[in-house]
Image (spheres, grey):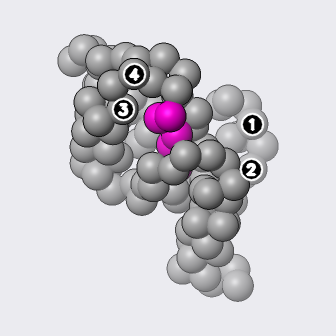
Amino acid sequence: MDSRVDELRGQPFAQYLDYVTDALLIDESITRLKESLAERVAKGMCAIAFNLTKVTAPSVTSAQISAIYDEIGLPWLQVENYCAARSWLQARIEDADRAAGRR
């Protein structure tokens, strides 16, 4: 993932995540996720959408990860599939481009 992000050379990008298993993050995992997200935001990540339809406790997972995204300041959207996320993600990329004076 990091090499793909580096190829973008700072251009805005968004991410779609399809969670397939339940996971409760422990403190160390939360810290590392925050660090990873901060690194990606610094490299141009401007939004994230995530799908929790395949997990058994979506409300728990949603509460935990959305709180992390909020703390980082990363716009997020919970969706049921990629099609539902695509236009929202593209709009966030366009917003970031405009904010940087590229559009």
Q: State which mark lies toward you, 1 or 3.
A: 3
Quarter of the rendering containing residue 89:
bottom right
Quarter of the rendering containing residue 64:
top left
Q: Nearer the viewer, residue 82 or 71?
A: 82
| Amino acid type, mark 2 | Leu
- Residue found at x 55% / y 46%: 80
Is residue 41 among the parts visible in the rendering?
A: no
Q: Secondary structure at mark 3?
A: helix
Marks 2/1: CA–CA distance: 7 Å
Magenta stretch prevailing secondary structure: strand
Residue receiving disc 2: 8
Q: Secondary structure at mark 2?
A: loop
Q: Position of residue 32 (x, y in %)?
A: 36, 23
In this view, 89 is above or below 26? below
Marks 1/4: CA–CA distance: 31 Å
Marks 1/3: CA–CA distance: 29 Å
In this view, 70 is above or below 52? below
Of the image marks 3 and 2, the number of the one nearer the N terminus: 2
Magenta-tinted stretch: 48-53
Q: State which mark lies toward you, 1 or 4.
A: 4
| Amino acid type, mark 1 | Arg
Residue receiving disc 3: 58
Left or right relative to 77: residue 86: right
**Badge 3 density bin: few <14, some 14–19, many ≥20, Cα 10 Å:** some
Q: State which mark lies toward you, 3 or 2.
A: 3
Residue receiving disc 4: 56
For the view shown, which residue lies furthest in the left direction?
27
Is residue 29 among the parts visible in the rendering?
A: yes
Left or right relative to 59: residue 50: right
